[in-house]
Image (cartoon, grey):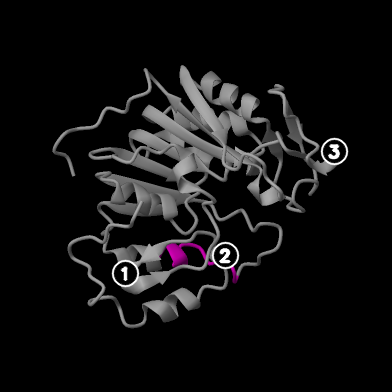
């Protein structure tokens, strides 16, 4: 989907130092199109279309958990969301980054400024996923939980916390075991037959990252989302035949009722 630049921002009015600000960030996780033909040098998401996020999100209030640089925050706004709240606790360093390479909200703020979104429509705050259920952020039509679940010591608790504030649909993307298991021999040695399996990594067995704790099969992930209160679930792999660990990922969409989001006509 082509990026939609807000009416108050144009390529001609792009901040002259935007390219320099982008270059000042040592590591970008997300690849985000900005005004003036500038694209941040990240690699994720692998295939945005595979995430099953609806093209029309008009009028919806969205929570983006583990937002990092903010690709999905800004994508929801481009698709018409009336408000997106982004949260992150900056605990994932991919097993290789340092404090200088993960500088809080710096990359997110560069993109938000460049895209012209104000804090009323696009807010962000440092917060643990486990604190969401306390209600300080209010309620949401849609929740994004991308690239987060396998970093959590308590993934089912996290899903329960998100379900407590989600009225319509949740989208959960995670590393999956279908094509890879460090305990079974690596790539091509996973659980390809729909097994109900989740592996635990007490150290850095998965991806040499000490913050990778749990990875499920796609089948298991779907039932985890269902058990959190989303009666209707579907999902799939991001890459059908992955050849590297980074591509062994899946997405599950969970819906409260049916499979259609309730979109307010005329909302913005």
The answer to which image quadrant residue 189 occupies is: top right
Judge by depth and name the residue closer to the eye, 163 or 34. Answer: 34
Q: Is residue 216 above or below residue 78?
A: above
The answer to whether 13 appears left or right of 138 in the picture is left
Circle 1 packing at 10 Å, graded few (<14), some (14-19), many (20+), is many
Mark 2 lies on a secondary structure that is loop
Q: Residue furthest front?
A: 241
Relative to 209, is 164 above or below?
A: above
Q: CA distance from mark 1 to mark 2?
A: 23 Å
Q: Is residue 104 above or below residue 78?
A: below
Q: Which residue is mark 1?
A: 35
Q: Is residue 149 visible?
A: no
Residue 102 is labelled as 2
Q: Which residue is mark 3?
A: 183
**Who is closer to the viewer here, 191 or 208?**
191
Q: Total of numbered circles in the picture?
A: 3
- Tell me what residue is drawn at x 33 percent, y 25 percent: 260
Residue 110 position, x and y percent, is 39, 68
Q: Is residue 189 left or right of residue 197?
A: right
Between 250 and 216, the one nearer to me in the picture: 250
User: Which numbered circle lies on residue 61?
Assistant: none
The answer to which of marks 1 and 2 sits earlier in the sequence is 1
Q: Are marks 1 and 3 in contact (CB under 8 Å)?
A: no
Rounded to the nearest whole Å, what is the CA distance between mark 1 and mark 3?
Answer: 45 Å
For the magenta stretch, what is the residue range? 100-109
């Amino acid at each position: 989907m082509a990026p939609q630049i807000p009416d108050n921002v144009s390529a001609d009015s792009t901040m002259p130092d935007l390219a320099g600000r982008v270059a000042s960030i040592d590591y970008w996780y997300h690849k985000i199109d900005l005004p003036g033909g500038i694209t941040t040098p990240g690699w994720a998401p692998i295939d945005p279309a595979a995430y099953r996020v609806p093209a029309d999100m008009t009028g919806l209030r969205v929570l983006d958990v583990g937002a990092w640089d903010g690709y999905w925050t800004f994508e929801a706004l481009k698709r018409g969301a009336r408000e997106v709240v982004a949260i992150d606790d900056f605990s994932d360093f991919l097993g290789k980054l340092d404090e200088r390479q993960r500088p809080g909200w710096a990359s997110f703020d560069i993109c938000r400024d460049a895209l012209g979104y104000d804090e009323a429509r696009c807010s962000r705050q440092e917060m643990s996923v486990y604190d969401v259920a306390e209600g300080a952020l209010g309620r949401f039509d849609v929740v994004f939980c991308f690239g987060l679940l396998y970093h959590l010591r308590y993934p089912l608790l996290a899903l329960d916390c998100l379900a407590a504030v989600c009225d319509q649909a949740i989208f959960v993307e995670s590393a999956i075991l279908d094509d890879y298991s460090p305990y079974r021999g690596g790539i091509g040695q996973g659980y390809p037959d729909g097994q109900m399996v989740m592996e635990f990594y007490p150290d850095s067995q998965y991806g040499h990252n000490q913050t990778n704790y749990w990875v499920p099969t796609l089948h298991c992930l779907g039932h985890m989302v269902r058990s959190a209160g989303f009666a209707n679930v579907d999902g799939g792999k991001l890459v059908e035949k992955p050849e590297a660990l980074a591509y062994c990922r899946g997405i599950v969409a969970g819906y409260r009722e049916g499979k259609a989001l309730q979109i307010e006509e005329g909302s913005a």
